[in-house]
Amino acid sequence: MGVPEITLSSGDCRRMPVLGLGTAADPPVESKIIKHAVLEAIEVGYRHFDTACLYNSEEPLGEAIAEALDRGLIESRADLFITSKLWCSDAHPAHVLPALQKSLRNLKLGYIDLYLIHWPVSSKAGNYEYPIKKEDFIPMDFKSVWVSMEECQRLGLTKAIGVSNFSCEKLANVLANATIPPAVNQVEVNPCWQQKKLREYCKGNGIVVVAYAALGAVGTFYGTNNVMESEILKGVAKARGKTVPQVCLRWAYEQGIGVLVKSFNQSRMKQNLEIFNWELSEEESKKISEIPQSRACLGKDYTSPNGPYNTIEELWDGEL
């Protein structure tokens, strides 16, 4: 069974496969491992891949795409949906277009399908580092940066544009001045951080939510075991003969959002695709809706005593 698609409201109404493979490896892995994982993912049916300037995965993803075309695993570049992201040090009006052009060179592609502002903060231009030095943070000029993002879309270098890690309030800042509204807001969403308020706001403004940390990002520096260890989710999985990840991904799909998974293991990749031919019952959905909520990715590394966000409350505008 193929992966269903969501139509993005802005741009050329591009269709995005609801399930994608994330390529941010934490802890980092060799490029050849990422390339191999992408090729295996294409073989089992993935067509949506998420990368970023920061991840150092653009080049191996590009190599995998070239090999997949060469081997006939896909018929054309148009079979794939590729997302990349603008890093904070390039979140300045004059740097947006060159940053996307650099990503395209890394990927060896003429265009990407979606380009996102990675975080709602800028940092000193030219410093590609994480974590960002506290003294290097700069308030983002949302209006001017977004104008530059729109120009990238008008030039055809990306088919759609959006944001990542934006609260309702920060989205409102962009929407207030946008000619082309954001097509996507990529944020943490899982049964233990359901983001109901943000999802409703995005839905009301024609913005598709795409979930990262859909399984709690276990094993990463910011991840949580709350999702995989949830007794409610384990109970639903056992009753249905499914895995906890399958229950989480099915739940996300039933919320009408896109979702990214990050497994480089081919058998788990296959399992994660097996979510489209069954449904959660009303009772199961109700149980999941009652799971205690807590954010895993707090974003402390994007706060600074020098501002613009002194606290995580300011970063997320109280959405904690």
Image (cartoon, rainbow, N blue to C red):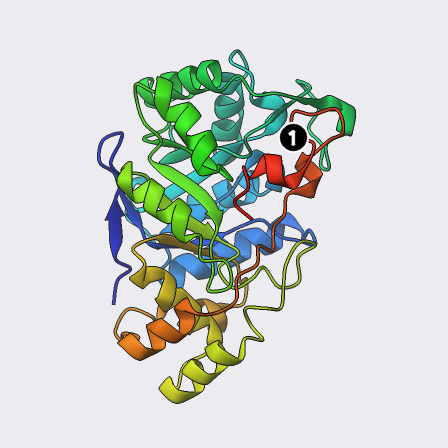
Q: Where is residue 79 in the image (x, y as percent from the top left)?
A: 29, 46
- Above or below, 3 against 28 in this view is below
Q: Residue tagged by mark 1?
A: 309
Quadrant occupied by the N terminus: bottom left
- Residue 190: x and y in percent read 47, 60
Amino acid at the residue labelled 1: Tyr
Identify which residue is drawn at 51% across, 40% down.
165
Q: Is residue 70 visible?
A: no
Q: Quarter-wise, where is residue 256 in the image? A: bottom left
- Left or right: residue 247 versus residue 30 is left
- Residue 172's image quarter? top left
Q: Is mark 1 on a helix, strand or loop?
A: loop
Q: Write down the quadrant of residue 237 in the picture.
A: bottom left
Give the answer, above or below, for where 237 lies relative to 248. Answer: below
Asked if residue 233 shows in the view, the reply is: yes
The image shows residue 142 at horizontal and vertical percentages of 48, 20
> In this rendering, is residue 8 above or below 242?
above
Looking at the image, which residue is at 45% across and 32% down? 169
- On the image, the x and y values in percent for residue 90 come to 58, 22
- Check the image and name the residue furthest to the front: 318
